[in-house]
Image: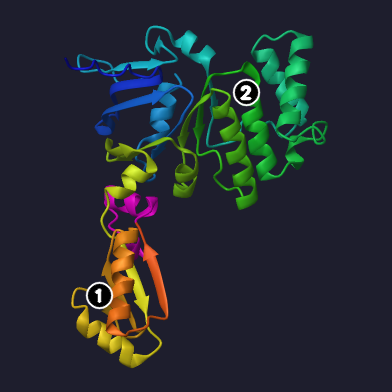
Amino acid sequence: MTKPPPPRPPYAIQAIGLRKSYGEKLVLDGIDLAVPEGTVFSLLGPNGAGKTTAVKILSTLISADAGADAGELRVGGHDLAAEPQAVRAAIGVTGQFSAVDGLITGEENMLLMADLHHLSRREGRRVVAELLERFDLSDAAKKSALTYSGGMKRRLDLAMTLVGSPRIIFLDEPTTGLDPRSRHSMWGVIRELVAGGVTVFLTTQYLEEADELADRIAVLSEGKIAAEGSADELKRMIPGGHVRLRFADPAAYRKAAASLSEAQVDDEAQALQLPSDGSQRELRAILDWLDSAGIEADELTVHTPDLDDVFFALTGGGTKEAVR
């Protein structure tokens, strides 16, 4: 007797056959997305691939294409077309460009959001005070937002998004332009949100960011999903792993190059590059061969494909080496 398949996880976001065109230009060509609750889903792609368009559709800011071949779109369990108000009540959106009003204080920006969510004066002030403390903005709360650094503005932007306690948050390139310290600080905030059960739909220009945060990643290219999976699954799809051996002794280099005919040679650097998946077994085999041949390499480095390699390979950019 065969076992029944395991139950599917509850999805915060589901898109089947999502399409969007502007005139003759097809931006999203029937893409499918499924984002489990309480996870980070990252959508990657080159500029103009349609990432922001997808976010705008799923957050009800614009409509998907209608018609006989229109797909099914659900966010927070609600049909996007039939229940847009229910979707809006379940989500928060932090766009590429800050929604912070620089002419008023950080606290006033937050209280404005509390009013928009129809919180009572007492409840609004309580929520605002908690969020300002959570995002380390209490000391700057009474200062004009115009004086805030880029990192402070993005934290305030996200804090404003959380005033309505959304369970699904769309973050469209939230750390663009931030310095590394501010970016890492924002990553910590995102991890805390997800630990509390919030679902995050993230678009980003920083592949390291997706690698650090995302449970699943989809790569968007020419309006279609080119690949989807965890960061490790995507990396395993791409060939190009290798071990690089560098030699200080010219005689040792020549001997190794003559024996390892499959290696790529770099005479200027006196280095050899061997195809490898970086596994312990392959590394041990290389080291054992060097020992048995009486050859000493001065430097051994292992390269395994990263998300940069995945991105370039899946979006038509070749490899990192090819575009440098």
Magenta residues, start to end: 305-324
Q: Quadrant of residue 137?
A: top right
Q: Position of residue 239 (x, y in %)?
A: 25, 56
- Above or below: residue 157 compared with residue 209: above
Find out whether the residues at labels 1 and 2 contact each other: C-beta distance under 8 Å.
no
- Above or below: residue 227 compared with residue 284: above
Q: Is residue 27 left or right of residue 119?
A: left
Q: Quadrant of the N terminus?
A: top left
Amino acid beneath label 1: Gln
User: How many angstroms separate mark 1 from mark 2 (CA)?
Assistant: 53 Å
Q: Quadrant of residue 253?
A: bottom left
Amino acid beneath label 2: Leu
Q: Position of residue 97 (x, y in %)?
A: 56, 36
Q: Residue 264 shows which numbered tag?
A: 1
Q: Position of residue 284 (x, y in %)?
A: 33, 66
- Asked whether residue 322 is drawn in magenta, I would say yes
Number of marks in picture: 2
Q: Regarding mark 1 in the picture, which secondary structure is present there?
A: strand
Question: Residue drawn 34% across and 91% down?
Answer: 250
Q: Is residue 261 left or right of residue 277?
A: left
- Above or below: residue 273 compared with residue 198: below
Q: Residue 162 shows which numbered tag?
A: 2
